Amino acid sequence: MKGKGGKGEAIQPKPKARKKKQIVKIVKHQDNEIKIKNKGGRPKMEFDLKTVEKLGQLHCTESELGAFFNCSTETISRRMVNEESFEVAYKKGWDMGNVSLRRKQFELAIAGNITMLIWLGKQFLGQKDKMEQTNKNIGLTHLSDDELKKELEELEQA
């Protein structure tokens, strides 16, 4: 048994864990020096807000944004919540995407696409498909149960 403290061997002490060097940033403010310790960890990912806006215009999901920027969906979700500029860029893009879709729908309708004309009429003008119902009111409220069954049988045969 080598190195395990067998016969005639001294037990070797474990090497001490190395202390991480703390990076200290010195900021001069007027005549005073302020030392700020680095928090460590991975540097914060930077996002181009114009690209975020363009992806929002395409109605990309948070998962798709993460795939595009090569980061996790959780990173995108945190930015939506914690950074107003990120959320504003995304929502502006989303709204501009809605405008583009609406413009195209109106262009199709004006060009004579009947389906689009009907759909837009229902959405914006409150138009509905006409559904006719025929109710024969033959005054059955005064009949007994047996008389109602007889009337029902006659209607089914007709």
Image (cartoon, rainbow, N blue to C red):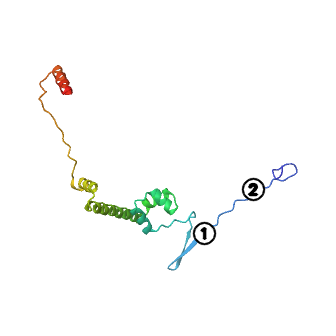
Furthest residue toward bottom: 31
Q: Is residue 107 left or right of residue 74?
A: left
Q: Secondary structure at mark 2?
A: loop
Q: Position of residue 29 (x, y in %)?
A: 50, 77
Which of the 4 quarters of the picture holds residue 55? bottom left
Residue holding disc 1: 23
The amino acid type found where label 2 is placed reads Lys
Residue drawn at (87%, 48%) of the image: 7
The amino acid sitting under disc 1 is Ile
Q: In the rendered structure, are the residues bearing label 2 and label 1 in contact, judged by CB atoms less than 8 Å apart?
A: no
The front one of 150 and 52 is: 150
**The label number, if any, that marks residue 98 in the structure image:** none
| Quadrant of image for the C terminus | top left
Asked if residue 47 is positioned above or below residue 156 in the image, the reply reads: below
Q: Residue at x 80, y 55 (%)?
A: 12
Residue that extends furthest to the top in the rendered view of this protein: 146
Q: Callout 1: helix, strand or loop?
A: loop
Sequence order check, earlier mark of 2 and 1: 2
Count of number-bearing discs: 2
Instruction: Where is residue 145? Give x, y as percent.
Output: 18, 21
Choose between 151 and 158: the one closer to the eye: 158
| Residue pointed to by mark 2 | 14
Residue 59 position within the rendered picture, expressed as x and y whole percent measured from the top left: 40, 59
Count residues near mark 1 (Cα–Cα under 10 Å), then give few for <14, some for 14-19, many for 20+: few
Between marks 2 and 1, how big is the CA–CA gap? 27 Å
- With 155 as the anchor, is 11 left or right in this view? right
Q: Residue at x 24, y 53 (%)?
A: 122
The image shows residue 46 at horizontal and vertical percentages of 50, 67
Does 26 sit above or below residue 138?
below
Asked if residue 5 lies left or right of residue 44, the reply is: right
Query: Who's the residue at 20% across and 26% down the image?
Result: 157
